[in-house]
Amino acid sequence: MKILITFFSLTLFTSAVAQQPENADRRRNFNTENYVAMREWDPVSYFQNKPARGNSKFSFEHKAITYYFVNEANLEEFKKAPSKYEPAYGGWCAYTIALNGERVKINPTTYKIVDGKLYLFYSFNNDNRLLKWNKDEAKLKASADRLWRAKMH
């Protein structure tokens, strides 16, 4: 029994240590404020076509990043499939990531869902980068995917 407990403890410790570099990369590269993602907007709400600011009483930490939700139902939905709801490119402007890998703030109400993935965009001072993204989405997405992978490793 003692051997089994030691093995289980060692397995949990090894798993936690293995996750630390990934979590550190996420914290370093994701668009957060105090490790809260998406300027406190509920990622599930975008998929309901009703983007809304979440509430800290409905929060959940996924791999060192905290998300807020508008209600318990959205929180539970996120828990079922976090990778489905997390925004592409750590929540930075998808268009700017595609151009040069630069991390630029977003306007949480300027977004697009493509193939089940949430993309957020800069949209301030008459510069709506979603409109630019739409002009050559396939090429820009391929570039953003490549540059983001490089940044995360």
Image (cartoon, rainbow, N blue to C red):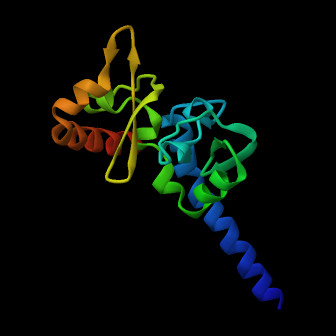
| Vertical side of 119 occupied by 23: above or below | below
Q: Position of residue 47 (x, y in %)?
A: 47, 48
Query: How many discs appear?
Result: 0
Q: Residue at x 62, y 66 (%)?
A: 15
Q: Residue furthest top?
A: 125
- Residue 109 in picture, x, y percent from top left: 47, 28
16 is higher (above) or lower (below) than 28: below
The outermost residue toward the bottom is 1
Query: Residue 88 appears at what percent x and percent y?
Result: 40, 43
Image position, residue 114 (x, y; %) = 32, 47
- Occupied quadrant, residue 67: top right
Nearest the viewer among 52 and 31 is 52
Q: What residue lies at 70% left-to-right and 47% top-to-bottom? A: 71
Q: Is residue 36 visible?
A: yes
**Residue extending furthest toward the front:** 49
Q: Quadrant of the N terminus?
A: bottom right
**Direction from residue 61 to residue 151 in the image, left or right:** left
Q: Residue at x 71, y 45 (%)?
A: 59
Rendered view: 108 above or below 75: above
Left or right: residue 135 compared with residue 42: left
Q: In terms of image quadrants, where is residue 143?
A: top left
Q: Taking the image as drawn, is residue 153 in sight?
A: no
